[in-house]
Amino acid sequence: VTPKCATHCEKPKCTVDCGDNLGCKTVCPTPLCTWKCSKPASCPKPKCKMSCEMAPRCGMQTLSVPPPAAGERVMSRGQARMRAAQWELGQWTGCSSQCGDGVRTRQVRCSAGNEAWCPGPRPSHKEKCSEVAHCSYKVGAWSACSAKCGKGTRTRSVECSGPQCLGDRPEDREECVEQAATCGVCEVTLWGGSGFSGWTKTFSPGDYSAPELEYRGVKCDDISSVEVVGDYCKLTAYEFGDFNKAHPGWSAVFTMGKYSSQDFVAAGAKNNDISSFKLEKTG
């Protein structure tokens, strides 16, 4: 006689996530038991499996999974994500500035999809940065030489386009040599009449007394303007015809430039009556 054997499978503890919970049930086959005496023997343990059917709106599907082992439990996908969630960090981008201060960014996402499930504060996706590899020096034009005749210096502006420039800084000052056309010249021209018009007389370096000027056609009390040409040229004019030796009077000094009768006073002359003068080259 083969009596019926009662079998028992522990009710599974499972939760499966498909948007909604799935219904779970345990399916246990009826074991075959053999009775040899008055009591049954060798009644095998049933092999149970858990069968979970998805909710209708998820699409009907039967999943067969083994029962949880000791120390294991079945949990939803969301619960699993929450337990293993971690921050995933992308690579930093390049600095937004090629020369100077800027920012760089990176992608920051939670592996679970919902940032609330990731532990700790959210890592920063932006930080300050500074780049100097593309900074360069901006160089201005050279100035005029500080000397018109001979050695001098000239300068230019040199500025870095950012907080730091790599390489050697260009020079902002250097020596120069200039030789203008008026460097080796020394002469004076006197005008008579009105302004820079009327009669003219030109003189080279030397001493010219009243008789010499009269001989050359200069009307001492009719001089209306003076022009001195030469960077190293100086004209000293005197009130009296003997260079003020016998009669003290005013004297006036003129260097390169043009002077009208109105400019005579600033140079030291009290009027336009130049009775004698000395023209000398100073360099």
Image (tube, helix red, strand yellow):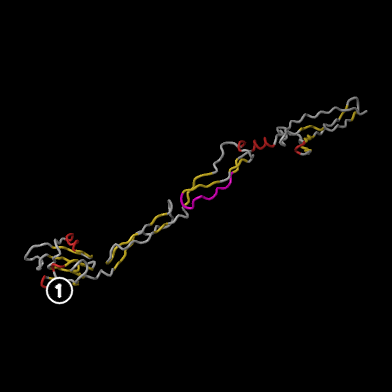
The correct choice, above or below, for 278 with respect to 57 in the image is: below
Among all residues in the image, which is located at the extreme right? 1
In the image, 36 versus 214, the foreground residue is 214
- Residue 136: % across, % down: 44, 56
In the image, 111 versus 69, the foreground residue is 111
- Give the residue at x 81% y 28%: 8
Q: Amino acid at mark 1?
A: Gly
| Residue beneath disc 1 | 217
As helix, strand or loop, the secondary structure at mark 1 comes to loop
The correct choice, above or below, for 120 with respect to 263 in the image is: above
Whether residue 99 is in magenta: the answer is yes
- Give the residue at x 15% y 64%: 272
Among all residues in the image, which is located at the extreme bottom? 215
The correct choice, above or below, for 264 with respect to 35 in the image is: below
- Give the residue at x 55% y 40%: 123
**Within-10-Å neighbours for mark 1: few <14, some 14–19, many 20+:** few
Whether residue 62 is in magenta: the answer is no
- Residue 43: % across, % down: 85, 30
Q: Quadrant of residue 182?
A: bottom left
- Residue 84: % across, % down: 64, 38
Q: Quadrant of residue 38?
A: top right
- Residue 223: % across, % down: 16, 67
- In the rendered view of the protein, which quadrant contains the N terminus? top right
What segment is highlighted magenta in the picture? 89-100
Taken as a whole, is the magenta stretch helix, strand or loop?
A: loop
42 left or right of 57 in image: right
Q: Quadrant of residue 260?
A: bottom left
